[in-house]
Image (cartoon, helix red, strand yellow):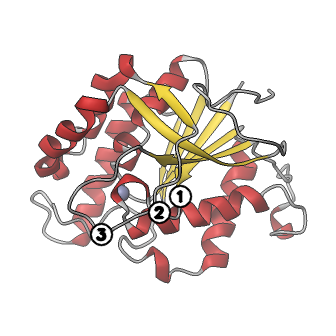
Amino acid sequence: MLRLMCVTAHPDDEAGAFGGSLRLYHDRGVETCVVCLTPGQAATHRGSARNDAELADRRREEFAAACQILKVSEGIVLDYPDGQLYRQDLYRVVCDLTLRIRRFRPHLLLTFGPDGGMTGHPDHSIAGTFAALAFQWAGRSNRYPDQLREGVGPHRTQKLYYQTGNVALPGRQPIALAPTTAVIDIGDYLETKIAAFKAHTTQSPLWALFESHVRPGGGKEMFHLGARVTPGPIAEETDLFTEVEE
Ligand SMILES: [Zn+2]
């Protein structure tokens, strides 16, 4: 069975940035796993939550509801602090992600690039940087060797993708987006993606803005191939699993 892992920063990233592809590949028989590094407790929009802990609890539930809509096989929210990923201990977070890769053994890893994806959020940049290191190091027996016991072995994920797009969002700090190398037609899943985003009820003030961005060009999700186990030139892709071996 083919497996895909997605590393995000906040509950709602799985829907907003990757939702169409997550559901599309599930329907093609791929097992999917989302690892979200924070419970999103620093969000501007907080519903009726009275404090960070309450907001974190709500957002974990919303994440679970979105994962159900997207039919994510395994959805995990870790407990790193929202808004503070750049201050976390690199060795520890990459260790955490490396172990998850070695256990789930994905064929593909999807995350954000150092640009932070379309929103340029600093947490996205750092989540993607941690994930890219874990992608590289999970396959090396000399990285985190203490993990290599009880059935856990080195694992080489075949491809690493960064979420990207062809236009930057207006009115934001400048970002240099990773060039698009893969365009995935998620037209049949656009409504599902929007429904998954709307499972995040604390973020309801963002729904209209999200829909207005995603509907016009939303039949597509775009990615940048950041790394691949087979060296060679890049080709434009319409399927992330192109040349992936089971
Ligand atoms: Zn986010």
Q: Is 183 situated above or below 36? A: above
Which element is circle 1 on?
loop
- Report crowding for label 3: few under 14, some 14 to 19, many 20 or more residues within 10 A (C-alpha): few
Q: Identify residue for label 3.
A: 173
Q: Earlier in the sequence, mark 3 or mark 2?
A: 2
Residue 195 seen from this side: no
Residue 54 in the image, given as x and y percentages of width and height: 22, 64
Left of 141 or right of it: where is 160?
left
User: At 23% from the left edge and 62% from the top edge, which residue is drawn?
Assistant: 55
Are circles 1 and 2 on residues that touch, CB within 8 Å? yes
Query: Which is nearer the eye, 107 or 72?
Result: 107
Between marks 3 and 1 in the image, the one whose residue lies nearer the viewer: 3
Q: Identify residue for label 1.
A: 113
Residue 148 seen from this side: yes
- Report crowding for label 1: few under 14, some 14 to 19, many 20 or more residues within 10 A (C-alpha): many
Q: Quadrant of ligand 1?
A: bottom left
Residue 148 in the image, given as x and y percentages of width and height: 86, 60
Query: Which mark is on residue 115?
Result: 2
Kind of residue indicated by mark 2:
Asp
- What whole-number distance in Å separates the C-alpha atoms at marks 3 and 1? 16 Å
Q: Is 160 situated above or below 144? A: above
Q: Earlier in the sequence, mark 3 or mark 1?
A: 1
Kind of residue indicated by mark 3:
Gln
